[in-house]
Amino acid sequence: MDLPSLALILRAAALSPNPDERKASERKLNQLQHTPQHLVRLLQIAVDGNCDMAVRQIASIQFKNFIAKNWSPEGSSAGEQQRILQSDKQLVRDNILVYVTQVPTLLRSQLGECLKTIIHADYPEQWPRLLDWVNYNLQNQQIYGALFVLRILSRKYEFKSDEERTPVTRIVEETFPLLLTIFNGLIRIENPSPEIAELMKLICKIFWSSIYLELPKKLYDINVFNAWMIFFLTVSERPVPVEGQPTDPELRKSWGWWKVKKWTVQILNRLDSRFGDPTLQTPESKPFAQMFQKSYAGRILEGHLKFLNTIRVGGYLPDRITNLLLQYLRNSISKKSTYDLLLPRLDVLLFEIVFPLMCFTDSDQKLWEEDPHEYVRKGYNIIEDLYSPRTASMDFVNELVKKRGKENLPKFVQFVVGIFRSYDDAPAEHKPYRRKDGAMLAVGALCDKLKQTDPYKSELEHMLVQYIFPEFNSPAGHLRAKAAWVAGQYAHINFSDQNNFRKAWHSVVSGMRDPDLPVRVDSVFALRSFVEACKDLNEIRPILPQLLDEFFKLMNEVENEDLVFTLETIVDKFGEEMAPYAFGLCQNLAAAFWRCLNTSEASDDSDDMGALAAVGCLRAICTILESVSSLPQLFVEIEPTILPIMQKMLTSDGQDVFEEVLEIASYMTFYSPNISLGIWSLWPLIVEALVDWAIDYFSNILVPMDNFISRGTAHFLTCKEPDYQQSLYNVLSTLMTDRNIEDSEIESAPKLIEVVFQNCKGHVDHWVEPYLRLTIDRLQRAETSYLKSLLVQVVANMLYYNPSLTFGVLHNTGLTSIVFDLWFLMLQQKKKSGLPANFKREHDKKVCCLGLTSLLALPGGQFPDEAMQRVFRATLDLLVAYKNQLAEAAKVTEVDCEDEMNGLESNDDESDGEMGMDDTEDGDEAESMKLQKLAAQAKSFRYVDEDDDDSDDDCNDDDEFQSPIDEVDAFVFFVDAIRAMQASDAQRFQNLNQSLDFTYQAIANGIAQHAEVRRVEIEKEKQKKAAEAAVTFVPAI
């Protein structure tokens, strides 16, 4: 297709008022996109100066999107890998370098993104001449284009380390001498233009990317490094040109020369923190760091202090630069040489620059009044904190009192108290509200230090009562907000007068109804600390409905995940008492989630608060479900509210919240009276996600899938539309046969197979052979010992499920010796500590015991005596190890219980209760909730993966397993199998007994005795449970 015709289609696709025409044009573009040279034509239209700008922009967007999706085959299916012809790629590479600097800025950003994609995919292998082009143009008239491309090229390696950084060496060696020459020429220009600033900024960015993680070897040459430092120090210390600065604040901080200043300060900071601190360096790099401290650190400090003085005299300094300057000064506190330089000017810095930055400002007041929602967003935004002078000031003060507190904390506290007193003494019309705000911020920021330092820690309650709590009634809204925040910071101190705690608590609650939104928000955040610190929940119970009501009113106004933290704290604290509110809470949280999701989808911000708040809503729903886990009927009532969320977010739309949604699905499938058809509708979504993109979440997916099979066994076995059994096999087969999937990624697959055969005993005979073949195929390729152990346990589970059928399949496929040789070898392998290298957990050993014991029931014709003798001895060894591990775990549990009892302030009646837990409802409520939480989450944490190191701690997760074999005692099962053999084939039993040496005969007798002990214990446990059930049963009247 010729260029004019393509341009007409592009125009119609984007600008036509007729929707049918737009759709037809879009279809035509989709048909054209894989035709030869279509990509080249899009580039030609995008750079054609004679073409309409709107069409050029559409072409550049189409060009960018197609390259982003199709240039690199990584992550694409095989059919998509050749969608761009190599000849077309070469044409694009040959032309884009020339065009990228000739097009307007709007289009340059699009082509720059394309160039980034191409460089990341092709350099250096497919584009070896790229650096030659850069070097040539750095020495000719295309300096801007060369710098623009070099910036993209260097950024590719910004976060690379070790061998991945190899190309950086050549880039630095060939281009840095040229960059120094260019830089030298630029800083000598008198009255430089904004275009010069742009070139200098690009050089700074190239240097930054090249040194971000590692200093290139060329820069260890002291002469080369010094040349760069001279330029950076010169630019850093040189005043920013006054002429041409924009008057608009937003434009001013983004002005080219301020950007240059920011990058130079950022580079100097990075060199100091990453490479210039001798305490953080290796022996090889330490001399360089010492040289840096001696030659440059002091000069940088002097320049930064002079720069910061601009604020003191009323000059302009962008927030980001102020933040960077204070970061450097903060890092200078711990180094003696730089602290000694800082010390003479410390008081001026602290009281005349840093403290004023902590105070409430005109811009704060303007934002408070004109856009309180934005004020709240900025105040609780992590990204804003990174650039905030106020945050940097607080960090500086904290570091100062932490590292140099002896000489600085007393005078700073005295300064703050002086502000408090002058505020109290001043008449109402002249009170320094903003300075008091800064002083209160300082007190809150220093809470950790003050809480542990004499004499201040004993005076905190008096300080709060005298100077902080009165501001709950201040006419200045920002002081009411700050009072709530500071009160929250100190809510956990031990109040000598509980009335002071109550007054603050009630003031915070009242603040939730304040007319100013920021006060309401700060009050809710403070409420969290008071709820955590409250020792008598009766203080809260009477107003709990009111709190929840105010809370959700605020959630309707503000999207912030920190708000949800407070709700989670309340739910955690009250546990089952939240049951009457659970349904309403979930409804409100679901509604808030949909609002946050809509906001997030409409926003392009990378620091989108709506997305974070949406995650918070789901997390809070999880907390509520956990708190009412003992009330299954509530799950039935809540299900219609949260099912639509799960149905939408278990697709690719929900990748950012997938883990939280899976946790909700886990609760719904485990605690509901039964699994509804609505919840079953999630199965296909989970399976599709697992195959397509969610392999990293396999361990999370395992939990609800287990619940579906173990709690909905009948439906799993009988339903044919969809066929869940076939669906499960298909997904496990796909994943386990994929040679590109690592062992660690499919550890949940054998666990799911185990769930099927343990829960469906006698109903899935037809799946024994397919799953067995699948398991052994992966076992023969497995590399990690943990996956091998799991796969062997699948075989053990199948033997326990049906030994005759399973052994027959192994025999018919000729895999018997392969499986058992590996199994016995793994049983014999030991770690350095002497403990088993495989089958480390109690559960692992038990499964192996049950599987091997099941073989003893096979007739002689199917299972030869020699093989049986080998299995018998291996089972005895395994039972001994299992018995010893159980005994050791019982000792640990007993010690833990004693420690817990000694640590709890429980009443005397608890001492007779089992494990000290009988009266938890009357004891420490926080501990009670902790125990309940552990119980509720058992299902979620039941599968704990072990590392293959020499740690002995990786076998202690058995308490959290729940499976049908829990009711089977391995020792009793073993003895019963031997007795059955003795009864059915006495000669075989005799042969087996005679084959044992004295040691194994003694072991066998010991196991038999232990089995009888276990029979008695099991019978007692049954009687105890029956008695407890009889006591709790209340007959109907």
Image (spheres, rainbow, N blue to C red):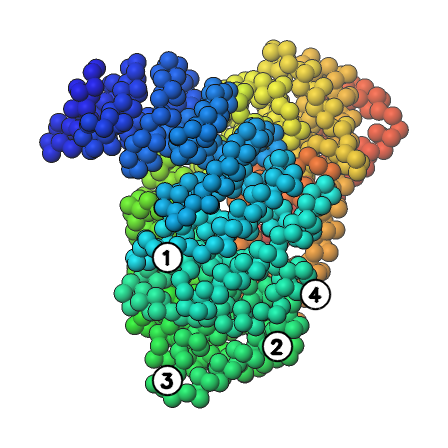
At a point 57% along the width and 77% down the height, the residue shown is 413
Secondary element type, mark 3: helix
Q: Pick whichever of labels 3 and 1 is earlier in the sequence.
A: 1
Query: Which residue position is annotated with label 1?
Result: 242
Q: Nearer the viewer, mark 3 or mark 4?
A: 3
Q: Determine contact: label 3, label 4, CB under 8 Å.
A: no
**Is residue 481 left or right of 14 when viewed as pictured?**
right
Q: Pick whichever of labels 2 and 3 is earlier in the sequence.
A: 2
Query: Which residue position is annotated with label 4?
Result: 902
Secondary element type, mark 2: helix
Query: Which residue position is annotated with label 3?
Result: 430
Q: Nearer the viewer, residue 224 or 433?
A: 224
Query: Which residue position is annotated with label 2?
Result: 410
Could you tell me how far apart the alpha carbons at marks 1 and 2 are, in whole angstroms? 41 Å
Percent position (x, y) of residue 601? 31, 44
Q: Nearer the viewer, residue 102 or 111?
A: 102
Q: Pick whichever of labels 1 and 2 is earlier in the sequence.
A: 1
